[in-house]
Image (cartoon, coloured by chain):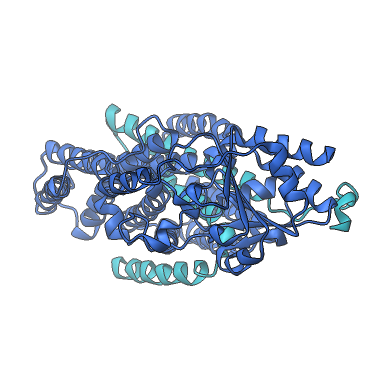
Chain colours: A cyan, B blue
Amino acid sequence: MFVTNLAILVVSGFLGFAVISKVPNTLHTPLMSGTNAIHGIVLLGGLIVLGLGTDLGAFTKLILVVAIAFGTINVVGGFLVTDRMLEMFKSKPDPPKDAEDGSS
Amino acid sequence: MTLATSFLHDQDFIDILYIVAFGLFIYGLMGLTGPRTAVRGNRIAAVGMAIAVLATFLFEGMGNWGLIILGIAVGTAVGVPSARQVKMTQIPQMVALFNGVGGGAVALIAWAEFIETDGFDGLKLTFVIPSLFAAIIGSVSFWGSLIAFGKLQETIPGRPIGLPGRGQQLLNLALLLVAVACAIAIASGSTAGALMVVLLLAAAVLGLFVVLPIGGADMPVVISLLNAFTGLSAAATGLALNNTALIVAGMIVGASGTILTRLMAEAMNRSIPSIIAGGFGGGGAIEGAVGAGEHGGTVRATSAADAAIQMAYARQVVIVPGYGMAVAQAQHAVRELARELEKRGVEVKYAIHPVAGRMPGHMNVLLAEADVPYDQLKEMDDINPEFPRTDVALVIGANDVTNPAANTNPQSPIYGMPILNVNQAKSVIVLKRSMNPGFAGIENELYFEPMTSMLFGDAKASVADITKELAEL
C-alpha cells in the first residue's frame, strides 16, 4: 500500500509541474491563492483522526478541533479570496456601459 | 443496515469519490491557468473540495460529530468574513495567513496522532516517518507564515532581523538538527512525549528565524515557498493516513508552489538559496544609500498642471504602476486619467513588472478591478522596447522595478534584476509620497536623472489632480 501511495505521490508531482508550468504571469497571484486553498485538504486529516478516534484524550480532542478549524479557514478563506480576485478577470459582458470608450 | 447505506460507507465508494475530487482539483487547476477559464476553474476545485469533505464524512464509524461541527463552524466563522472583507492590497498577507493555518493544521494532526498512539508505539516506519516530516514542515510553515504576514502587514519591521554574519545560519542549522534528532529518536522507538514537543518547538523557532532575516521585498517568494512546503506536508499526512486525496492534492500544490517560487525568484534575479540565507536590503542597502548621497539632491519637483500638459501633448504615455498605487487604492483614478488621455488621442499602455507590488500579478488584479482593458497591460519584455518611443512614462508608486542601478551599478543589491527601462523614455513623471526609498530600502537613481520630475503626494490624489487639470486644458 505504501509503495502504491508513493507512486501516486511521484506521479502527482510531475502532474503538478505539467499543469502549472504554463501559466501567464498575470494569473500567478490567483494561482498561488488557489493552490493555497487546495492544500487546505489537510482538513480531511483532522476529520479522519478525530472522527475515527476512539477514547481520545481531552487535550487531543482540543488539538484536533483547532486543526479542523485551521483547515476550514484555509479551505473556505482560500477559495473565497481566489474567487474575489478572479471575478475581476471575468470578461465584461456589458459593453453598453462602457460604450463611450469604444473609440479608443 | 440497509443495502443503500452500507454501499455509501463502502471504502471503495469513498475512494472513488476521492478520485472524483482530485480529478476536479486537477481540472480546476488547468482552468486557473487561463484568464477566461480561471473563475470556473477555482469553483470547480472548490466543488472537488466539498466532495472530498463529504466523502470523508461517510467513513465507517465516524463519530465525535459535535466536535467536528464545532471545528468547521469556527473555521467558517473566521475564514469567510476575513476573505470577504480583506482589501485587494492586503491579499498577499491573507494568502500568507491562510497558508500558515494550513501548515498549523498539519502539525497539530501529527501531534494528535503521536499522543493517541502513545508515541507512535510499535507503528511502521511508513507511518512514522511521513508523520514526523509533516510535523516539522507544518510547524515551520505555520510560524514562518505568521512572520511573513507580520512583515507584509508592517506590524514587524520589513528590514532583515537576525544575528550578524553566519551566526543566524548556524543557529538555524542547529535548530534543524535538534528537530531531526528528535524525529530520529521517535522513529527509532522512543515514546517520550517531550520529544515531540521539542521537535515542534524547534521547528517553530526555525520557522520564525528563517523568515525574520528575510527582507520585506523577498516576502512573496517566501510565501510561495511556504505554500509549497505546506503542500508537501499535506502530502506526507496523506501517506501516513493512507489517503489518496491528501497525497494528490498536497503533492500538486508542492510542485506548483516550487515552480511559482522559482519564477518569482528569477524575475528578481535572486536565487532561492540566497533569499533563504537572508539579508536582502541589509549590508547592500547601506552601500546603496551612501551612493545616493553623492547625487546631492538634484531632484526636480513638478505640479499636477505641468504633468497634465506634458501628457496631453504626448503621443504615447506608459503608466508604470507599483505598490504605491495599491496602497493609495489609486487604480480607479488611474483608469479615469487614462480615459481622459485617450479622449485626446494619446496612446496609453501599462507596463507591468513581474514583481511590481508584492506579488506577481498583483498589479493586473488591481487594474482589472478598475476595468482596464486586458490588452493594454504589457509585460516587461513587450514594453521595454517601447520606452525609447514613449513621450511620458508615468511611474505611480513603483520604485525598485524602475531603478536603473539594477543595470548599471554592480554594487547595488538589486544589480542584475530585470527592470522596466523607464529611464529611456523622453520624460518621466514619478508620483511618490516622499523621497523615502522603496521596499527593498535602496535609493533610486532614476529620480536624479535630468528627464525625471517628481510629483509628491498621495498617488490617488495626484492622479485625480492631473485628471482634473487635463479636463480643464
Left or right: where B184 falls relative to B306 = left
Front residue of this view, candidates B452 and B211: B452
Q: Position of residue B420 (x, y in %)?
A: 53, 60
Q: Position of residue B258 (x, y in %)?
A: 39, 61
Q: Position of residue B436 (x, y in %)?
A: 44, 37
Q: Quadrant of residue B352?
A: bottom right
Q: How many marks?
A: 0
Front residue of this view, candidates B76 and A30: A30
Q: Is residue B106 above or below residue A32?
A: above
Left or right: where A9 falls relative to B299 = left
Front residue of this view, candidates B196 and B96: B96
Q: Is residue B211 above or below residue B14?
A: above
Front residue of this view, candidates B32 and B57: B32
Name the residue at 44% across, 48% down.
B444
Left or right: where B197 falls relative to B472 = left
Name the residue at 58% across, 38% down.
B301
